[in-house]
Every structure is written in C-alpha cells, then in structure tokens.
Amino acid sequence: MNNYYMMIFAFIVQSVILSGYLFWAPKVRNPENSYDCWLVRGLRGIFFIVICYLSFIFIDTSIEILFLGVYGYGNITLYLASCVLLLVLGVEIIIGVVWISPNIKSLSTFIVMLILFIYQFEIERVVFFEDYDVMIRPMLYASIFVIIFTLIYEIYRKLKPEGFEDKPFWSFEKQFKQVFNWKLNLILWGLISAEMILMIEGYSLLFWLSFFF
Amino acid sequence: MSSKESVEYLKENLNIRAFLIFFRNFGLTLLLITPIFAYVGISSLREISLSNDKYPFTFWNGKDPKTEIVIVWETVENESSAVWLGKSSDNLNLIYDGDAGGVQLHRVELSGLEPGTQYYYRVGVASTPPNYIGNINSFKTAPNSENTEFKFALIGDSQQIFGIGAHERIAQTVGALEDLAFVGTLGDIAQESDHQGNWNQYLMEAQAFMSGTAYAPLMGNHDGWYGEKYSENKYKKYFGFATDPIYADDKHTLFNYTFSYSNTQFIIAEIAKGDDEKLDRSRNINHDKWLNATLAASQDKTFRILMLHRQVFATDAFNTDLINRIVPIAEKYKVSMVIYGHFHHYERFLYDNVTYLLQACGGVMPTDTGINPTTPYTKAFSMGAFYTHFAINTTHIVARTLTPDNDLIDMFALKNDNSRAVLVEGGGM
C-alpha cells in the first residue's frame, strides 16, 4: 500500500480514535477507569481488529519506504513525515490494542492477524502478484477467528472449575493512557490531517528539508 | 459486568437522553473529519468558479515546428483575434487581425517563421489602443540543423479530481526552467473530459510553462475520445488539430501526430481508451499503419521517441495487448524510448534493450496500491509528484526525473549506437 492511501486511512482511524477519547468513551481519558460492559467491549474488540490490521499496513508501508527504499531516497523530504506519522500511529495502536494488557485471547488474535497479514502481503502478493483484497478478507478471517475463539473460550469457562479467568499477563494500561492521552492524540490528528492534505498538493510537513540538501 | 447486568444496565439507560447524546457524539465525530471535506469542497468550488478566459498557448501538433505554430486563447465574450509577433519582446508587430465577427475560442495559425528563432507574441483585440490579453509570451521554433542540442520536459497525468493535486506546483517548477524547446504531456490532463472547470484549472496552472514554450499535447482516457461519443470534447476544442484530413470515425483516429525536432522524431500515438489497445478494430489497425509508416519514414533520425497514454509495462498492470503490439514495433523500427502514463507512479523498464518509461506523476494522487516493483525489467521505481527533463544532443539522450523541489528521483542516459538507443547509465535495481 502506498503512503498516500495509507495517510487517508490514518486520518480516518485517528479521527475515530480521537472521537473516542473526546466524545464516545470519556472513561479512557482517565487512567483509573476502564469499561466492563460486554457490549462496549465487544464493539471495541471489532474496532481493535480493524485498526490493528491497518496498523500492520501502516508499519509495513513505513518500513518498506524508509528502510527498504522502495521509492528511492531522492524525494525523501516529501514522504518522510508521512512515514514517521504512520509508524507512530501504527506502534501506538498495536501497543494500545494488544501489548498494554495482553491475555491469551488478545495474543492469539494478534498472532492470527499477523499470520494473515504476512500471508496476504508478503506471500500472496509477492509470490502470486495478487494485489487485491488485501484489506477485507484478512479482517473477515480474523473476525471469524475471534468469534469462534470466544465461543470456545466461553464454553471452556463454563465447563472449567470455578475461578478460571483469562487474566492479562501484565498491565501498564495506566502508564499508556498517561502518555497517549487525548492531547497527544489531538496533536497527532492535527499532524496527520495537515500531512495528508499537503501530500496531495505535492508538499509535506518536512518538504523544506530539501533546501538543506 | 456480567451479560445479565449489562442487559439490565442498557434497559435502564436507553432513553431519549442517551439517543440525544448519541447523535451529538455522532455529529461531533463527523466534525472531526471535516478537514478533508472542507479541503475537497474548497478546491472544487475554486475550480468551478474559474473563468473560461484563457491566456494564450502554443502548439504545433502535426505542423512543422521549424516554421509553423498555432496560437490558441479563449475569451468569455465574443471578440476578434489579433496577434502581435516579434523577435524581441519590445518590438512586436501586428501580424494577424481576424475573426471580425467575434469568437470565443481564438485559434491563429502562423507560418513562414524562421527556424531556430525565439519569438515573442501577444494576443488580444487590435483596437486603439490595443486591448491585450495577458502578458508577452514566447516560443522557439525548431532548429534547421540536426545537430542542435535541445531540452524538453514531460509532465504525466495531472488529472486533478475535485481540483486537488500537485500539478500547479510541478507546473511552476517546470515554468522556471530555462531554454526548453517544448513541454509535453502524457495524457489525462483532465479528470472529466467534459468538465469545463477541469480544463480551466489545468490551462490556468499550465500557463506557468505555456507562457514561455510550446506545448505537445497527448490525449488520455480521461480527456475525451475522437468525436462521436462526446459532443463536448474539450481536448478537441483546445488541442484538436489533425494531421490527417480525414475526420475521425470508427476507422480513423484524430489526435495522433508526429513532429521532428533537431535529430529526433516524436511520435504521439492515440492509444488512450481501453478500446484503443486491442488490434480487433479497424480504427486501431489503421492507427498502426500510420505508426509503422511514420516510424519507417523517420529511420534517418538519430532518435525516435514514441509517446502514448496507456501503460505498456507497469508493476501490477502488465498490459499484454499493448506489449504484443508495441514491443515488436519498437524493435523493428529501432524506437529509442517508449514513454507513457496512465498508471499513477514512476517506473522505468528495460525490455529487449528498449527503454520504456512510465511517467504518470504530473499531479494526480498516486492511486496504485502496491509499492513494490514486481517486474524483472524494472530499473527505477517511485511514487509522488514528478516531472522528467530530457536533454538530447547528437549522440545521447539524458533524462532526469525530478520532484517539484528539483530533487533527483532517477537519471538515465541512452547513447545512439547504430541507430539504436543503448542504455549507458541508470541500469539500477
């Protein structure tokens, strides 16, 4: 995926994340709070699957452009800012969705999605030159996996002796919320919005670096 | 919270207030994504609001660039057409005064010009005092000698949907280049062929380079077709100048042309729409008869450059119809380079020792999804807003693809070797 497309996706994702912080889920602003309602957690799970998969693409795009040099480096001043923003957003999402408080379910889902991503992007596309359906199909497969996994998990929980719970291995949710708070996300949203528009117009937030080379 | 508790919680809290909060939050979320809509909306309004008035531009299409040129400009009101011309910008003489009844699209063909000469011109109405339109523009006629070094620039697909894109920035950079023989396009000038706003914006932005040099147009699939489908074909309106006196129909193309400049023959093919690709239509067969004949007649030239719109080779979009059609022609007639657009990225190929250049980065947003070049023939690949600058001398073609900040994306050189253009620099990847 090219960084132009990805910046549009990043803008949409970041707008939704920010709207979560500001309007939909005010509890996430407070490091002490979290949502317990199954409906909210369910909706959040679906959203996490989507943005987690997108974050793989954000990171992959940035690495391919910045470190593997697929565009060459002649016009780096025109894509550096977008790649850095995609990288920051992708890392924030993956940490926020999986690694701040991982349990068996979230880690399993993450691994399945990673396998789907690698197959889709690095095997199917590179080996078979298949460039389409890299978005919907993996997310659909991941969702099916999560539904089946959740059903098995719930049945297993009912059958198991009392006290079974898929506890997180660790949790630094509070520290994460303190760093990636709504203010930082607002700044990130502003930078992504500006970069997206500047890119379309042939500029970039860092295009002025060109004058120094 | 258990499932039962959650259901109870929902029952207690699902009321009018909850719905109002939902709609408020939904509205505020929409507000967050307004920057993109505001940007597109403002750009689109700006494009729509542009006047039909156009400053003059020049092209020769099928005419002889040594001695002939066509000047075109447009006025909202019906006006007569006058051209002042001279070899010095401070000494222009009225050489044409026509269209007394008044026209909106002014088209003046000049002939008898001196080869290799810089001309300055101004247009307007020959009243007293003269009513000039725009500033003094210029163009240079092609040299008589076949040993004259020259430079030109190519801008690929500009195609600014809703008025957004990087074409203006590229046009200004190209406009600042000195000593260009001409600036060419590779098609898809407009997004919608019958949208006047698209053309107003393009020709306004392109004035940055059109004011100082001639223009070599080429039709893309977004620019219209040959006649019967679109009654309001803007490409035909502004650049439609057939070399062939036969009017376009199912059997004949209209916008293909050729011209020679110094030691190089430029062949501008009309392969714009998907229907133009396969050789299953008499129209395309006739087009290739012309192509073969034109190339056969230009074997005395040092270089032959074939330009068309639709892609031949491209990552993720190998066009087997055109590969089967163009590659044998390029091989047979020793074409130095085949240049095309259509797929919105930059990619250079070497196939059977012929250079194929995909340059569709003239301002349109890159719409190709893949970023990995996936062909063994790819020598360079990039994505963004670029133009390509060519310098041709008696033995070499040197091409440099640059960003609007003039940062180098790709450079390659071809050397004439027994009438074939051999890649001598830029064999990367």
Image (cartoon, rainbow, N blue to C red):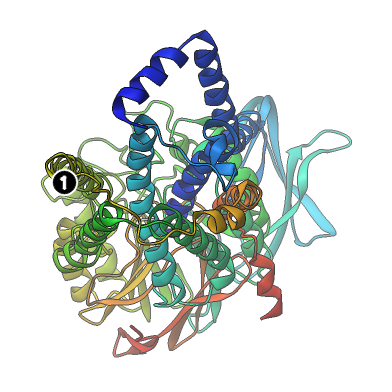
Among the 4 quarters of the image, the one containing residue A2: bottom left
Q: Nearer the viewer, residue B426 or B305?
A: B426
Residue B34 location in percent, x, y?
59, 33
Q: Is B425 rendered above or below residue B60?
A: below
Residue extending furthest toward the front: A162
Q: Is B7 rendered above or below residue A199?
A: above
Q: Quadrant of the N terminus of chain A?
A: bottom left
Q: What residue is at 15 percent from the left and 56 percent from the top?
A: B321
Q: Secondary structure at mark 1?
A: loop
Residue B317 horizontal side relative to residue B144, left or right: left
Q: Nearer the viewer, residue A45 or B352?
A: A45
Q: Is B81 rendered above or below residue B111?
A: above
- Label 1 packing within 10 angstroms: few (<14), some (14-19), many (20+): few
Q: What residue is at 37 percent from the left and 81 percent from the top?
A: B302
Residue B298 location in percent, x, y?
32, 72
Residue holding disc 1 = A161
Residue B49 horizontal side relative to residue B289, left or right: right
Q: What residue is at 30 percent from the left and 53 percent from the top?
A: A106
Q: Nearer the viewer, residue A7 or B257?
A: A7
Q: Nearer the viewer, residue A130 or B416?
A: A130
Residue B329 location in percent, x, y?
19, 68
Among the 4 quarters of the image, the one containing residue A107: bottom left
Amino acid type, mark 1: Pro
Q: Quadrant of the C terminus of chain A?
A: bottom right
Residue B121 horizontal side relative to residue A145, left or right: right
| Residue B220 in view, yes or no | no
